[in-house]
Image (cartoon, rainbow, N blue to C red):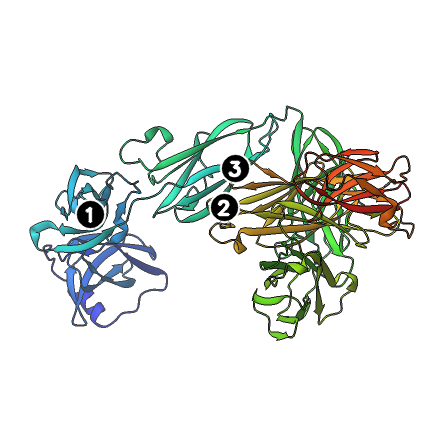
Amino acid sequence: MMNMLSMRPALAGLLLLGTEASPALTANLQVIQTDICGQSVGMLEASASGGTEPYQYDWYRIVGGTPEAYCLDCGVNIQELPGGFDYKVVVTDALAAMAEQTVYLNVDAMWGPDYLWVFPYVAGELPYLKVYVGGGGQLGPGSNVLVEVTGADLFAEPEAQFQGIGIWWFRPTAPSGVVTITYTFPGGQCVVQEPYSVPPPVVVPDMTVLDVQGSCSNAPTGSVTIALNNGVGQGWLRPWLGGAYWPAESPLVQILDGTTIVTLENLYPGVDSFFVSGNLLFASPGDQGFPYGCYGSVSFTIPNLGPTCGTVQGRVFMDDNLDCSWQSTEAGVPDVVIEVQPGPVYTNTNNSGQYDAGLFNGNYTAELLSAVVEEHCINAPIPFTIAGNTTTVDMASISLVPLDARIALASGPARPGFEYHLGLSARNLTPAASGAVTITMDFDPVLGLISAEPPPNTVSGNTLTWDQPEFTPFQQRSVQVLFQVPPDVGLIGTDLITTASVTTVNADADPTNNTATIQQTVTGSFDPNDKLAVTSTRASDALYFINQDEWIDYTIRFQNTGTDTAFHVIVTDTLPATLDPATLEIGAASHAFTWQLRDQGTLKFRFFDILLPDSNVNEAASHGFVSFRIRPRPPLFPGTVIENTANIFFDFNEPVITEPSVLVAEFSTGMHAHEQEQMLLMPNPTRGMLNIIGHMDPGSTMLVVASDGRVVLNERAKAVLDVSRLAPGAYALRVIGVNGEVMSTTFIKQ
């Protein structure tokens, strides 16, 4: 204990009388260091303000509620204090004004568990255990503290990195298990033992590039999306990109459990590597010696789009106060299409209403394409200029209708004896609240209900009903239903009809999109990865009637027929020039997904972390699907062929390319088919050549359709048709005249 100074009688008297401090003088007191292990190493520091300088600092310790003089006129700080007491400082200024402050000084056993780290390590290695301990300036750099670990060997001598902290490195003798850490503090009077469970080895995640967007050479407009999956263990991954941590402001981006998708933006063109490490101490990729052996990397190339380009970006938002500027309380408009002219170039808004597109230098216009909201501050289309820069074009929008709810249906294949998966999507297209919502589904009576997620509130016969709470602005909800198709091959060729509807308590301005119907034909064997096209009238599965049909509904179906779980599925669809991206509407799907529209009409669906089992493990769950609807691009002339395919990527394998879905544009004449005997096929069955006997107008189109509805041949009409490349099975031959009349018959390919 410090030498005591004699208490001055006047000051003692003032203290005992409880003299109030002058309002002009204030005292502050803070703990600089607690007492550690009862070794009397506590530190306090006082300060004063106001009053008249100079100040005098008198220190007291409170024992049994009574202040005892501890150190009078001792300055602003005192050290070597025992813990477990209240300490008071009394400050007196030059005019005898007084102020006081009291704090409690704790006794701590150690610094705490935050000062013990195990660096991530991989199988076949031993972990590194880093122990931090110290007691502030009075203990020095931990030199008087002994640290021992039972079950580990000292790897490096104690080191000091900053005042009061000692650092020990240990190497456990086993890759996992429990070690005991013993701390012996100065004098040997304070010994603390703590068990610590060493985590198991880390499995460094697989890293694969999912998507790359090019960059201008004069501005960082590129991006890369990387999937990290199959990682197991504890600890955060620290990414390194372009010679620096990424992003610099929040470098720890992924914990090593599960799957993470990382998108890096604002990248320059060129070759780079995305590097991840369990290192927490800011090591670069060149520092992968001790103790940073847990790391991996993947390289990628950002294409160079040239020196004459830039980016347009912006936000589409609901301008609630009509001031033409965005406030954080104003909702973004998600999932709407932006058209940039000339081009056209398309992009879409994300969940926050933000969008961007890369463009070459020049003058452009941007226009919001929506039936329910419109920009109200600037006459559309909005002009802007790209000159090697990033230009912002925000769109302050108002609603064109008070409320509009929409429902969509999509399904997987229907086969006798198998499960039939149907997805439903209900969406509030507007910024208005819907009130309570009711969703109803009437399914084909031949089906047996297996399950639904979420479960329906009521099941009555073949009607399911979901009572849903209010849909907030632009909210979307999904329903997944599994049915059982009876094991009756006699069902092949029949249609299963399912209808769903959505109703809202608040009035819906457009009830025409509140009901959806799906007609699914029961098939036998089928291609599990395909693209189906259905027209509005459903009058023909080969023709789009210009004077009757409005939409084409596409469903892309896929199945994991590999030998392991598919973590990600990406579906791309480069829309042909015959389809208008400005009319795109996204429908229902089997799993959660995100979508993106870019360039002249490249549509991409991303099923991240879908965890689709392979068909050998779980055939029913190995399927998935996604749907959208779109209008043909006008003008549409008779004879125009609308052909579209999709590319399906399972994880990072080569794409599965679907057979084309083909529709031929014609005018409806009310005559959809001639009698079958008007066209004769010889020989039937055939191994290669078909002789076609019957009248065919010049310019007629000849389609060969498989039993599952896919068009496998599309040619101009001819008298002899080569079908030698077709797989054995039953097919339909349809000859479509220039006026829309159809002759059809069937044949067998041996």
Instruction: Please state the horizontal and vertical placement of residue 693, each as a whole percent of the image.
Output: 86, 39
Residue 450 occupies which quadrant of the picture? bottom right
Instruction: Please state the horizontal and vertical placement of residue 354, each as a whole percent of the image.
Output: 64, 46
Whether label 3 touches label 1, CB < 8 Å: no
Image quarter of the N terminus: bottom left
Which residue occupies 73% across, 52% down?
Answer: 397
Comparing labels 3 and 1, the label whose residue is closer to the camera: 3
Which is more N-terminal, label 3 or label 2? 2
- Disc 1 residue type (three-letter): Gly
Residue at the spot of label 1: 134
Whether label 2 touches label 3, CB < 8 Å: no
Which is more N-terminal, label 1 or label 3? 1
Q: Residues within 10 Å of mark 3 (few under 14, many from 20)?
A: few
Whether residue 493 is visible: yes
Q: CA distance from mark 3 to mark 1?
A: 53 Å
Residue at the spot of label 2: 566
Which residue occupies 17% across, 58% down?
Answer: 72
Q: CA distance from mark 2 to mark 1?
A: 50 Å
Which structural element holds mark 2? loop
Image quarter of the C terminus: top right
- Left or right: residue 122 versus residue 366 is left
Residue 15 occupies which quadrant of the picture? bottom left
Q: How many marks?
A: 3
Residue at the spot of label 3: 653
- Left or right: residue 673 versus residue 653 is right
Which is more N-terminal, label 1 or label 2? 1
Q: Closer to the camera, 99 or 418? A: 418
Instruction: Please state the horizontal and vertical placement of residue 412, each as a whole percent of the image.
Output: 62, 54
Instruction: Please state the horizontal and vertical placement of residue 320, each as a whole percent of the image.
Output: 70, 58
Q: Is residue 445 above or below residue 537?
A: below
- Disc 3 residue type (three-letter): Asn
